[in-house]
């Protein structure tokens, strides 16, 4: 089974700063990558997906994919206290998602 | 905006009892999934369902588990004889294709006593 690794954190950033979250994956053949946000006691909420090498931007979020180095990252610009959550990286294997353990992000006001 | 719904939000049961968790996927989606998350652990895949049959299942999804789409809108997960270790959040998800983004419901917290 594919493995997805994330630093558990917590990652603490001041309000207004850029938060950088990273994820590595084991299978070089992986094609599709997803970032979910999960607030405590809630379900995963899709933020972004990325299939191609390079950057993909959506509002304050930018996903970056480097298939040669097998990592995916998520940048959150102008971080807000409401961004404080656990961020889950996931890859598709077959038709299921394989999740990392998540990185806790804390945005301090 | 369409969303996945799940009922109940919280289910408490005695060990050995049967439980049925219900989900209504997004209406034009064709692929349905169940995941679970034990407190403090990763989200884990249980089963995927397409065209009225299981397309993939994990090692967790043993003979105690079953899924059904009884009426064209609901998607259910049945646990026949619950164990203490079945206590977890159970999430239903759906997607329009098998490689596309999956949208999760709010979850059912199952507590087995």
Image (spheres, coloured by chain):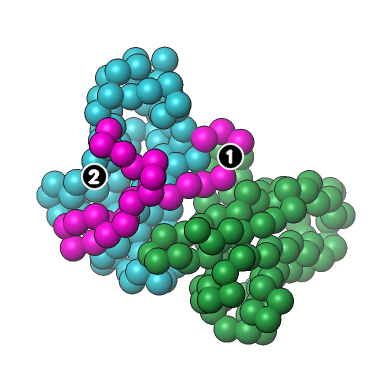
Chain colours: A green, B cyan
Q: Nearer the viewer, residue A107 or A75?
A: A75
Name the subunit of mark 2: B
Quadrant of the rendered image containing residue B61: top left
Q: Quadrant of the N terminus of chain B?
A: bottom left
For residue A87, say whether it is visible: no
Q: Residue at x 44, y 42 (%)?
A: B36
Picture coordinates of residue B78 (x, y %)? 25, 35
User: In the visual, does B34 lie left or right of B80?
Assistant: right
Quadrant of the rendered image containing residue A100: bottom right
Picture coordinates of residue A62 (x, y %)? 68, 74
Direction left: furthest residue: B71
Q: Nearer the viewer, residue B3 or A67?
A: A67
Question: Which disc is residue B41 wearing?
Answer: 1
Which residue is the site of mark 2? B67
Say whether residue B48 is magenta: yes
User: In the visual, does B41 lie left or right of A74?
Assistant: left
User: In the visual, does A7 lie left or right of A42?
Assistant: right
Same-subunit check for callouts 1 and 2: yes
Q: Quadrant of the C terminus of chain B?
A: top left
Say whether residue B1 is magenta: no
Count how many numbered circles sit on residues in the image: 2
* Span highlighted in magenta in the image: B38-64
Vertical arrangement, residue B38 with respect to residue A39, above or below: above
Question: Which disc is residue A91 wearing?
Answer: none
Mark 2: few/some/many CA within 10 Å (<14, 14-19, 20+): many
Mark 1: few/some/many CA within 10 Å (<14, 14-19, 20+): few
Q: Residue at x 53, y 42 (%)?
A: A42
């Amino acid at each position: 089974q594919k493995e997805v690794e994330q630093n558990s954190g917590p990652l603490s950033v001041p309000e207004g700063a850029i938060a950088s979250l990273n994820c590595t994956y084991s299978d070089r053949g992986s094609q599709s990558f997803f970032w979910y946000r999960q607030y405590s006691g809630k379900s995963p909420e899709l933020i972004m997906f990325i299939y191609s090498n390079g950057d993909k931007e959506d509002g304050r979020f930018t996903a970056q994919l480097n298939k040669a180095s097998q990592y995916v990252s998520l940048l959150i610009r102008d971080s807000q206290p409401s961004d404080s959550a656990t961020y889950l990286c996931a890859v598709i294997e077959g038709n299921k998602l394989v999740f990392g353990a998540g990185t806790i992000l804390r945005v301090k006001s | 905006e369409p969303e996945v719904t799940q009922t109940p939000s919280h289910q408490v049961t005695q060990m050995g009892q049967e439980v049925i968790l219900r989900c209504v996927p997004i209406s034009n989606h064709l692929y349905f999934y169940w995941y679970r998350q034990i407190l403090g652990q990763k989200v884990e895949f249980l089963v995927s369902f397409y065209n009225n049959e299981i397309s993939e299942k994990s090692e967790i999804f043993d003979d105690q588990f079953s899924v059904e789409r009884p009426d064209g809108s609901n998607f259910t997960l049945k646990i026949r004889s619950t164990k203490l270790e079945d206590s977890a959040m159970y999430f239903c998800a759906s997607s329009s294709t098998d490689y596309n983004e999956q949208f999760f419901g709010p979850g059912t917290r199952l507590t087995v006593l």
